[in-house]
Amino acid sequence: MHLFAENLAVELSSYYRNLALGHGVIPKVFTLVNGAGDQYLFFIDDLRMDQDEENQFLAYIVQEHEAVCYARGTLVILEKTQQLIEFAVIDQDDAEAIVCSAQLTRDLDDKPVGLSEFEKTLAPKKTIFFSGLFEPIELSEDKAEEFEGLWDVMKPKILHRTMGI
């Protein structure tokens, strides 16, 4: 597993902890890291696409930026006051994914009041429903231009930084 994948798991745990307890929000997040250590992170909900188009766009970004790993996270609601924050880190060259989960507790006013430590486990990559973003995709020229234009519009608004090696 690439060192960036391990770092991504640690960073997303901290990121979600800060968002949940500091701001009371748990967005659907997507992030990737390329071989040079460039990391991009954005909220998936901002895409406003259906599931198929969203997956095509994410695969396009992963492939255009030559990602070595990526992660996707979300909130899973068990009941009103008991929820899970879950994410998985997919490494290009590893058959296993890093899966992390933490229990979020809310009060009766729906305000986050506690978050357990993220439990990290390994799971076969093929069991993660969004693990296929490294697989080559065929896009029409129009669709590729549309995705390129969307990425250009998004880029100034998303977190972009360089991860230390």
Image (tube, grey):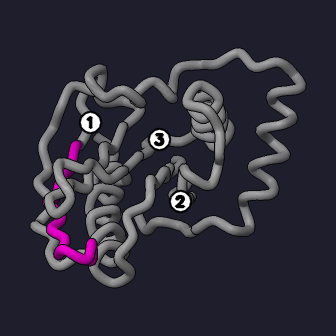
Residue 161 in which image quadrant: bottom right
Q: Residue at x 36, y 51 (%)?
A: 74
Residue 75 visible (yes or no): yes
How many marks overall? 3
Q: Secondary structure at mark 1?
A: strand
Q: Residues within 10 Å of mark 3 (few under 14, many from 20)?
A: many
Kindly report the distance in space between the C-alpha atoms of the residues bearing marks 1 and 2. 19 Å
Quarter of the figure that contains the C terminus: bottom left
| Residue 2 lies within the magenta run | no
**Residue on which disc 2 sits:** 41
State which tag comes first along the sequence, 3 or 2.
2
State the separation of the CA atoms marked 3 and 2: 14 Å
**Where 81 falls versus 69 (above or below)?**
below
Q: Is residue 110 magenta?
A: yes
Q: Name the foreground residue: 141 vs 68.
A: 141
Please name the residue that numbered disc 3 is placed on: 68
**Magenta part of the chain:** 99-111
| Nearer the observer, 146 or 137 | 146
- Foreground of the two, 153 or 24: 24
> Which residue position is annotated with label 1?
97
Measured as percent of width and height from the top left, residue 71 is found at 40, 46
**At label 3, which amino acid type do we have?**
Val
Residue 63 numbered tag: none
